[in-house]
């Protein structure tokens, strides 16, 4: 078994281990086919994993079942699966009430538990979702991204024709914008990334604001919404907008959803939150939304093809990463590691 293991900043080693044996808990062996190497993976690669020592990277991946522990696994050899990378602790109050989605110490593969950049991984069947033949492996890699964005859209209160502001510097903003259109809301995509703005236009996201050539975002949103502003605002935590600007497009009583767990910190403007009666809340994963995300991709309701980037051969990953000059190359197109 081979695994790309991060042992320090920019120190990614291909480690070879003895083949593992399935257990009652990790009851399915998956032969990995493709794993995403995205912005998060690259920033972990740059900074290392600190006191944790070492970690196998890789959060999002698709593979094929190669072996099952027993017949109860509900999956068969050769089934193609996407992996839901969240593993509940089974010990906290919420888990004891079988409320696994709200687990208080949820592990995420490739973040705080061993990830998917391996040739074979043993996993519980409960986190594997069988893929229909009509969904390509490249598109299926984005099921977790679509699932997280579904959690965002489900957490808002949208009605048809309602404007929703989406602040995003990376591609996930384009998924939220498409989902909002799918559910008949009107996304207003605000970005400082020229390429994101261009792709948004090609995806028929009608309202876009490029902050590189707009000094007054609030004024622009006022014009778009006919002074009503936005009752729902989505902010991606890996973006670098001023929070004052984010709150400035919100209407009175608006909901502001902060997405993701980016390392970037922002100064929170407390006065605006209080004065406008804003409700601020966070969404950081797509737990529980995988079947719907798969369906949206199978029916081609959501386009993810613009995110598919360069393919890197598994054994060549370490060398390829040494050649990265600018981390921005991960902002729009994810790299795919083919195993
Ligand atoms: Zn738990």
Image (cartoon, helix red, strand yellow):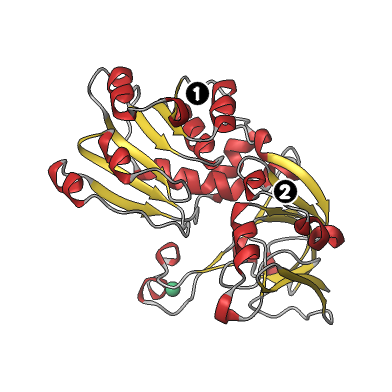
Label 1 secondary element = loop
Residue 205, numbered label: 1
**Which residue position holds label 2?**
335
Local packing at callout 2 (Cα closer than 10 Å; few below 14, some 14-19, many 20+) is: some
Residue 95 shown left or right of residue 198 in the figure: left
**Quarter containing ligand 1?**
bottom left
In primary-sequence order, the first of circles 2 and 1 is 1
Camera-near label (2 vs 1) is 2
Q: Which quadrant holds the C terminus?
A: bottom right
Residue 28 visible, this orientation: no
Q: Residue at x 78, y 72 (%)?
A: 13
Q: Residue at x 27, y 40 (%)?
A: 247
- Residue 311 at x, y = what percent? 80, 47
Q: Residue at x 60, y 59 (%)?
A: 43
Residue 114 shown left or right of residue 315 in the figure: left
- Residue 150 at x, y = what percent? 47, 43
Q: Which quadrant holds the N terminus?
A: bottom right
Q: Do residues under tags 2 and 1 come within 8 Å of each other at their CB atoms?
A: no
Label 2 secondary element = strand
Quarter assignment of residue 10? bottom right
Quarter assignment of residue 152? top left
Residue 17 shown left or right of residue 41 in the figure: right
Depth check, front residue: 213 or 282: 213
Q: Under 8 Å from ligand 1: the CB of mark 1?
A: no
Residue 320 visible, this orientation: yes
- Residue 118 at x, y = what percent? 77, 67
Local packing at callout 1 (Cα closer than 10 Å; few below 14, some 14-19, many 20+) is: many
Depth check, front residue: 159 or 271: 271
């Amino acid at each position: 078994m081979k695994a790309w293991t991060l042992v320090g900043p920019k120190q990614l080693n291909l480690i070879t281990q003895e083949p593992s044996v399935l257990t009652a808990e990790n009851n399915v062996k998956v032969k990995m086919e493709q794993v995403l190497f995205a912005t998060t993976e690259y920033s972990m690669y740059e900074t290392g994993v600190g006191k944790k020592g070492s970690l196998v990277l890789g959060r999002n991946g698709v593979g094929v079942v190669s072996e099952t522990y027993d017949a109860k696994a509900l999956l068969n050899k050769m089934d193609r699966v996407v992996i839901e990378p969240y593993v509940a602790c089974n010990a906290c109050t919420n888990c004891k009430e079988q409320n696994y989605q709200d687990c208080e110490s949820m592990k995420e593969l490739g973040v705080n538990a061993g990830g998917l950049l391996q040739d074979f991984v043993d996993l519980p069947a409960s986190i594997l979702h069988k893929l229909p033949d009509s969904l390509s492996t490249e598109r299926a890699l984005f099921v977790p991204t679509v699932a997280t964005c579904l959690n965002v859209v489900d957490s808002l209160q949208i009605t048809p024709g309602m404007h929703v502001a989406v602040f995003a510097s990376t591609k996930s903003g384009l998924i939220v914008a498409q989902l909002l259109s799918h559910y008949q809301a009107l996304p207003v995509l605000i970005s400082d990334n020229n390429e994101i703005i261009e792709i948004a236009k090609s995806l028929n996201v009608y309202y876009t604001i490029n902050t590189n050539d707009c000094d007054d975002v609030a004024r622009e949103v006022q014009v778009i919404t006919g002074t009503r502003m936005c009752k729902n605002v989505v902010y991606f935590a890996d973006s670098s907008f001023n929070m004052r600007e984010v709150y400035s497009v919100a209407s009175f009583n608006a909901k502001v959803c902060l997405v993701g767990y980016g390392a970037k910190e922002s100064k929170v403007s407390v006065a605006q939150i209080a004065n406008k009666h804003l409700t601020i809340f966070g969404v950081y994963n797509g737990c529980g939304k995988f079947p719907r995300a798969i369906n949206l991709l199978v029916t081609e309701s959501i386009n993810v093809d613009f995110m598919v980037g360069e393919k890197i051969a598994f054994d060549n990953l370490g060398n390829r990463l040494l050649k990265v000059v600018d981390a921005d190359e991960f902002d729009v197109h994810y790299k795919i590691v083919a195993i």
